[in-house]
Amino acid sequence: MLRGRLTPEAGALLLRALDAARETLYRRARATEVPAPVGDPPTRVQQQADALVLLAEAALHHELDPGTPGERYQVVVHVNAEVLADPAEPGQSTLEEIGHVSAETSRRLACDASRVVMRHDREGNVMEVGARTRTIPPALRRALLRRDQSCRFPGCRVSVGQGHHVRHWAQGGPTTLTNLVLLCRRHHRAVHEEGYQVEPDSDGALQFRLPDGRPLRQNPPTGPVPDDPALMLKKHHECQGLRLDARTACPGWLGERLDVGWALDVLHPRAADCQSNSFIV
């Protein structure tokens, strides 16, 4: 059994991918002339497991093109234009079938996605639906990939990235090569939701900043490399009283759920003892 916790948009993406893989797998099975095996048909859980294996095989063998998903497997976010322009504004920011997400999450997803403008009346009824357009056209995306080649966040070399508007298009930022930067999924989230900043310098070069505004160095400071770095690190640990071995980083937790009742039985008496001892003079 696999258990995991994902961000809302990553979870929605995984569910869409499993739906696509499951349909592909069982559509192929129905299309073949091989007789069905004797016994009960596979359950939903078994089908999901088979779909997950198919995704793994596709990732290893590149048999499926992740760039051409079916229309119904797209992850859809509904967000008001006012929210995109200013995250402080009240309004809708919802991931379809998942629920509310932050305005910055919607702004990040809108940086490089298909966009459909819908107009509603005061009662919320749809009055007009515009044509679907790409936030970053394919030709411009190819130019961006050729220029940046990998994530531009300092120290990151991930080659698979997303186009980020330095000045968001909802705030009037142009969708041009000079206003775009390639960021991997992790660092795209860092810039939008975690307070990291990216802006051009006076000479046009990109400057990344920490959430507190301090500049983020493009490269770590360099210095003389010791003859035996491992030995130096070991002596440093010994001075701090640390004893590290091959199992130091292995967690003792097996992934089971927290037993709240047991935790309270253990922690509550200790907390009560600490409280009572604090009054002893």
Image: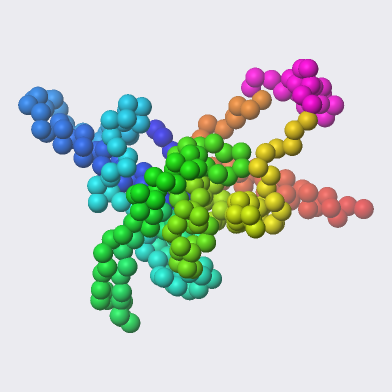
At x 48% / y 39%, what residue is drawn?
149
> In this rendering, does residue 11 appear at all?
no
Q: In the rendering, at what x and y percent does residue 185 appear?
A: 48, 45
Residue lying at the far bottom in this picture: please name it. 122
Front-lying residue, 276 or 78:
78
Rendered view: 24 above or below 60: below
Front-lying residue, 25 or 273:
25
Residue lying at the far right in this picture: please name it. 281
Instruction: State which quadrant residue 222 falls in.
Output: top right
Q: Which residues are magenta?
A: 224-247
Rendered view: 150 above or below 139: above
Whether residue 243 appears in magenta in the rendering, the answer is: yes
At x 60% / y 30%, what residue is drawn?
251
Q: In the rendering, at what x and y percent does residue 147 appear?
A: 48, 43
Front-lying residue, 47 or 234:
234
Q: In the rendering, at what x and y percent does residue 244 appear?
A: 72, 23
Front-lying residue, 265 or 126:
126
Q: Is residue 212 left or right of 66 when viewed as pictured?
A: right
At x 24% / y 47%, what residue is drawn?
70
Quadrant in which the N terminus is drawn? top left
Q: Is residue 254 left or right of 128 when viewed as pictured?
A: right
Whether residue 231 appears in magenta in the rendering, the answer is: yes
Q: Is residue 262 left or right of 42 when viewed as pictured?
A: right
At x 56% / y 50%, what residue is drawn?
190
